[in-house]
Structures are given as structure tokens and as C-alpha cells.
Image (tube, grey):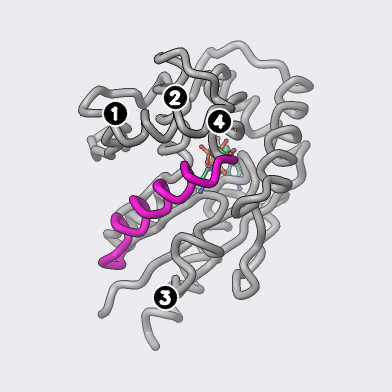
Amino acid sequence: MKPISIAIDGPAAAGKSTVAKIIAAKLSYVYIDTGAMYRALTFAGQRTGVDLNNENELVEILQSINISFENTAFGQNVLINGEDVTEIIRTPEVTNEVSIVAKHRLVREEMVRRQQELGSKGGVVMDGRDIGTHVLPNAEVKIFLLASVEERAQRRHAENLSKNFPSDLVQLQREIAKRDQLDSERAVSPLRKAADAIELDTTSLSIDEVVDKIMDIAVKKLAK
Ligand code: CDP
Ligand code: CDP
């Protein structure tokens, strides 16, 4: 069976990476977390001390780093020039500034180029904000995952508490809403549902229910 490409987009904490990883495992496909690439660049910029509003400086940093993924028994690691940054790119410091980095046109052009290269052979499940619209416009399956902002904040809150991280539900909701606004209103490839994407509101769905729905769609495409 010819491998297909599956694009999963949507706002923060809609469940994209959770379901994308499960679907990739079920199909023996490669999972590509494009958000992790923007997070890695944000962390690299912060560590170097550049102004994240300075597009040219960020592009220079991006050109000097290789961002790669490594699958382990415990999940997927994210590496910058071979250094494991999996945990540190999820801190609130990175999360709250990543949308500044992701608004720059030249940064996005280079990220999209790298993401298209990673997805060039098909057999990928890629999640992000612009996968169906820009990165993989010909993906056979395009999903746009949604959930209310209250539910998304609650999910992140539960996740934080399960890891014993400090967590404030009201603050999380505010931060998620702010990031959604920046991602949806930026000039370059804003967060949008592709015209041919299937919208799935997951507010009252379990992870398994979401996975089943997407798998049904993928299996039908594979059978064609
Ligand atoms: O996991 P979460 O939804 O919180 O975020 P993420 O997928 O790790 O993405 C982090 C940020 O990177 C987003 O808020 C966007 O600003 C940016 N991003 C993007 O602009 N385009 C993508 N394809 C993926 C992420
Ligand atoms: O990648 P994205 O930011 O869209 O979300 P995520 O990190 O995959 O999911 C955020 C949290 O919501 C995780 O703790 C999931 O276990 C949980 N969750 C979900 O993803 N989907 C549901 N239908 C219910 C809960």
C-alpha cells in the first residue's frame, strides 16, 4: 500500500501531538512535531540572548543549528546539533515566547523547507499550525482539531499536575488564548483550517475516540 501523509493542525493543547503519535505508531509512520522545531529555535535564541523580534538574527541562529528527532523506548526526543533539548523546550519560558519566533517570514520559510524534506517520502503524520495549508498541501488526510479553550487549559493543567509541575488553571487559559490569538492573527501562514481539512471538535471526546475517527478516515484513503 502506498504510504500517505497525514496533516493534523489546530490550536494549542487540542490534542494534536497525543493523537498524531498514536496514529503514527498504528500505521508504522514517522511522527513529525513541527511545533518542537519552533520551540527549539526559540530556546536557541533565548540561550544566545538575541532579541526574538530580530528576524535576521534568528535566521542566522537557525542556519547554524540542525534540529532532529530521535525515537526512544520512552517517546521522541528533540535534539539541537545532537544535544537533547526535549524537556527544556516545554518550559513556560519557551512556550510563552515561541509565537514571537514563529511569526517571522524567513524563519517560517526555512522551517517549512526542512519539514517538507522530512515529509518528502510520505508515510508521515505531521502536526502543527500550517501543515494542511502550507507544509503538506497535498496531504491525503487533513485534520483540524478543535476544543474549547476551557477544555484545552484543563487538559494542560491535568498534564502539569500529573508531572508534579506547578500549574495555575486561570493563567494557563489566559496563555493559551493569547498564543492562539498570535498564531491566528500573524501575517505569514496563520493558523487556519485548510479548505479540504476535516474539522473535529474534541471537547467532549476521549483520546481513543479521536484516534478512532482519524484512523477511519486514513484507512479509507489507504484503501482507495
Ligand atoms: O503543543 P502546543 O500546541 O502547545 O504547541 P506546539 O505545537 O509545540 O507549537 C508551539 C508554537 O509553535 C505554536 O504556538 C506556534 O506559534 C508555533 N508553530 C507554528 O507556528 N507552526 C507550526 N507548524 C507549529 C508550531
Ligand atoms: O499537541 P497539542 O498541543 O495539540 O496537545 P497535546 O499536548 O497532544 O494534548 C494536551 C493534553 O490533552 C494531553 O495531556 C492529552 O493527554 C490530553 N487530551 C487529548 O489530547 N485529547 C483528548 N481528547 C483528551 C485529552
Residue 67 appears in which quarter of the rendering?
top left
User: Label 1 amino acid?
Assistant: Ile
Report the magenta stretch's main SS.
helix
For image coordinates 45% across by 74% down, the residue present is 138
What SS does tag 1 mark?
A: strand
User: Residue 44, image x and y in percent?
Assistant: 39, 22
What SS does tag 4 mark?
A: helix
CA distance separating discs 3 and 1: 35 Å
User: Label 3 amino acid?
Assistant: Val
Residue tagged 1: 80
Any atom of ligand 1 within 8 Å of the CB at mark 4?
yes
Horizontal arrangement in the rendering, residue 76 relative to residue 44 (left or right) = left
Image quarter of the C terminus:
bottom left
Q: Earlier in the sequence, mark 3 or mark 2?
A: 2
Residue 89, numbered label: 2
Residue 194 appears in which quarter of the rendering?
bottom right
Q: Earlier in the sequence, mark 2 or mark 1?
A: 1
User: Residue 50, image x and y in percent?
Assistant: 48, 18
Q: Earlier in the sequence, mark 1 or mark 4?
A: 1
Residue 168: in magenta span: no
Q: Give the range drawn in magenta.
A: 103-123
User: Label 4 amino acid?
Assistant: Val
For image coordinates 32% across by 32% down, the residue present is 78
CA distance separating discs 2 and 1: 11 Å
| Residue sitting farthest toward the bottom | 224
Horizontal arrangement in the rendering, residue 31 relative to residue 212 (left or right) = left
Depicted 48 relative to depicted 215: above or below:
above
Image quarter of the N terminus:
bottom left
Residue 219, numbered label: 3
